[in-house]
Amino acid sequence: MCYNPSYCWILGLSLGPFFTQRDRKQQRVPRTITQLYSYYIYNILKNHGREIESPRDVFLKIGEMAFTGVSEKKIVFRNGDLIKYNLQPSQFLSGFMMELLERDDSTQSVVYTFPHLTIQEFVAALAQFLTPDPGDIRKLLSEAFSKDDGRFEIFLRFFVGLSSSQSARPLEEVLGPFLHQTICGVIDWVKAKVEGQIGNITNKFGDTENETGKRDLLNTFHYLFESQNQTLARVTVGSVEILKFGHLTSWKALRLTLIDCAVLSHVIGLCDTIKHLDLHHCSIRCEGLQRLRSALHKCQVLRLGRNELGDSGVKLVSAALGNPDCKIQELGLWDNDLTDSCTDYLSNALSTNRSLTELNLGKNKLGDSGVKLLSAALRNPDCKIQKLHLDDVGLTDSCTEDLVSALSTNRSLTILDLGLNSFTDRSVPALRSLILTRRSLKRIWLMGNRFSPNGKRHVESLRESRPGLSVGV
């Protein structure tokens, strides 16, 4: 829960009083952000509600003011705003808002603000959840969703989260029961929204190639997570096969936070048919991958390039590869700050994995020592790897014999990329031997190495003895 400092602060304020009650053994730790904020507001209403007549009515007025503030991007309120909503400074009001002294030239005035913008957004969502006609719910949600500047992003997550019985339970104790029609209206809206976003995935003309489309899809996943409605999630995302938030170019990829990764892991866990997960260039790092670790083994295509995973991240990936139920066939770890320290974990996983057919380790710092460790796994006759990318990983002539020896026993290899390394003419005999003896090899890239013109000609001449072989030198 503590992926965001503001949530840590709310966590302390919410659960401190809540779990010191005598019945704390019967309480459940909040699983979503909405549930966390529900406990926070519950504590305010419980502690200050007896000090004012009609606390529900007063709260709804505070909530309406908060909603107007979210709509107008306003976080500071003045006495005029309180008068407009028939509010007066009180201990009850101070439970929700802070009083600040504002200096303007020689005068001083008191202004009011919520302790944090997320609290304002939650109060606004809760008030709207309690007040509108159930028939207007979808209109309210659709209008909020249509704002593309993000002002209603968290508001909508809270609103949907309030349809969860665990989020509603503490609040209903002090605010009365939530309308069943409202809850049903929220669920119907989320269902339609998720199905629309999923439709964009399967439609080649959909907009999930741009950041806005990916952000909209991720937000709908947040709605599913906050709702904690597994039936709804399985109906809407259970048959999803492709989830693509990454891209080869950074400006088309979506940066994922730790919370995003946790939500994505939750959704993938409910996908029965997931095949392709693309997180290339999503800046998830090892911490984000930690949140995703339980879902990685389910994907047939897993693209994690350019995420700064480091060696510790590959340890998590190796655990997924070693899972007996692993379905990963294509694994992309290109440009992830990997060193030879991670290859021991990876080699051990590859020695037992029987699903992987394509491995991309390009643009890392594996060096000769790292590839020598990998060679032990590649030498295994049960190794199924068909496409191996080791371009720009710092290889020299020192590792050629080990690598070629390992690949010579591999029965499935068809594509090998060794470009942008530091091989010289000393490696040419071994490479020629590999190409001649490994008849399954269809394509080999050696561009960007340090071969002399004569060395290049020796390699290129193999095309004559191997018709159909593609050689790039």
Image: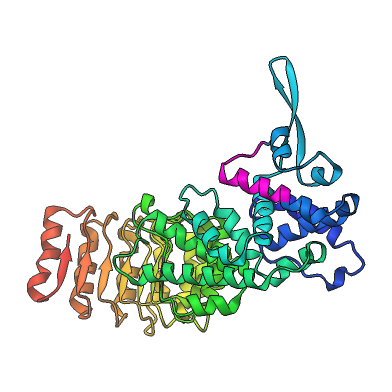
Closer to us: 246 or 155: 155
- Is residue 74 one of those drawn in magenta? yes
142 relative to 149, above or below: below
Quadrant where the image shows the C terminus? bottom left
Residue displayed at 77% across by 46% down = 96
In this rendering, would 424 be left or right of 328?
A: left
- Is residue 108 one of those drawn in magenta? no
Extreme residue in the right direction: 22
Residue 290 in the image, given as x and y percentages of width and height: 57, 64
Residue 398 in the image, given as x and y percentages of width and height: 34, 60
Extreme residue in the top direction: 106
Residue displayed at 26% across by 59% down = 419
Residue 199 in the image, given as x and y percentages of width and height: 38, 71
In this rendering, would 198 be left or right of 451?
A: right
What is the magenta range?
61-76
Residue 425 in the image, given as x and y percentages of width and height: 20, 58
Closer to us: 104 or 257: 104
Quadrant where the image shows the N terminus? bottom right
In this rendering, would 259 be left or right of 332?
A: right
Any part of residue 365 in sight: no
Closer to us: 282 or 167: 167
Q: Quadrant of residue 429?
A: bottom left
Q: Quadrant of residue 405?
A: bottom left
Residue displayed at 71% across by 63% down = 35
Residue displayed at 44% across by 55% down = 254
